[in-house]
Image (spheres, helix red, strand yellow):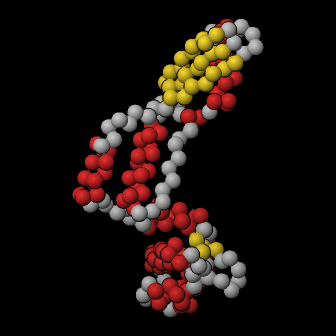
Amino acid sequence: MKNKELELRKKKILEAAIRSYIKEMVPVGSSLLVKKYNLNWSSATVRNIMAQLEEDGYLRQPHTSAGRIPTDKGYRYYVDNIIRPKKLSSQEESSIRQQYKRSKGIERLGEFIEKTTHIICAITQQAALVMMPSMAFGTFDKINFFRLDQSRVLVVFFGSLGMIRNVVIFNQTDSSWICLKTPWWFITSCCNYML
């Protein structure tokens, strides 16, 4: 058998195994895949290829008598190489545009991400989890310092991702204003607290 043909078989069997597992959430056996996905190979052939996929780290067998389930590597391959993104219909695209137009008052990144999450849920009819990027991984565009009183300084961080964060720094002495003249020390001392 040619190497290319084997790789094609592996890909088809991995796709069938992952689709079945996603749908049923039970370990997948070779006989089930042959019947359910009309594979043109015998159960023994599918079983051997599944064993190869297990050796390659794409599937695993929870216990000896069970079928196989996808690994993280298998899911990653499935997402990156097998599934194809579905193109939105013109009606869906129009609906998304209208929802954003009705939300003209969005000024903060968090509000925009929240709105996007609601739109994703409405379109897919699925739960969605969206996490905002941490400013610890962004850069600062600007940092402003405002002395509030003898012992407090307001620090406002303007992030490269459009986020704005602020923190009030307390100091026991009046020397906190002197620290602003050496901002790297000051930023280092308060960033871990804020971010």
Is 189 positioned to the left or the right of 72 in the image? right
Determine which quarter of the picture holds residue 186.
top right
Q: Is residue 48 above or below residue 142?
A: below
Where is residue 26 drawn, in percent x and y?
A: 59, 79
Q: Residue at x 45, y 62 (%)?
A: 126
Q: Residue at x 52, y 87 (%)?
A: 32
Q: Is residue 150 above or below residue 193?
A: above
Where is residue 46 drawn, in percent x and y?
A: 53, 85
Q: Residue at x 71, y 7 (%)?
A: 174
Where is residue 122 drawn, in percent x and y?
A: 38, 58
* Frontmost residue, 37 versus 167: 167
Query: Which quarter of the rendering shows the C terminus?
Result: top right
Labels in figure, total: 0
Q: Residue at x 56, y 34 (%)?
A: 135
**Residue 123 visible, this orientation:** yes
Q: Is residue 156 above or below residue 68?
A: above
* Frontmost residue, 84 versus 86: 86
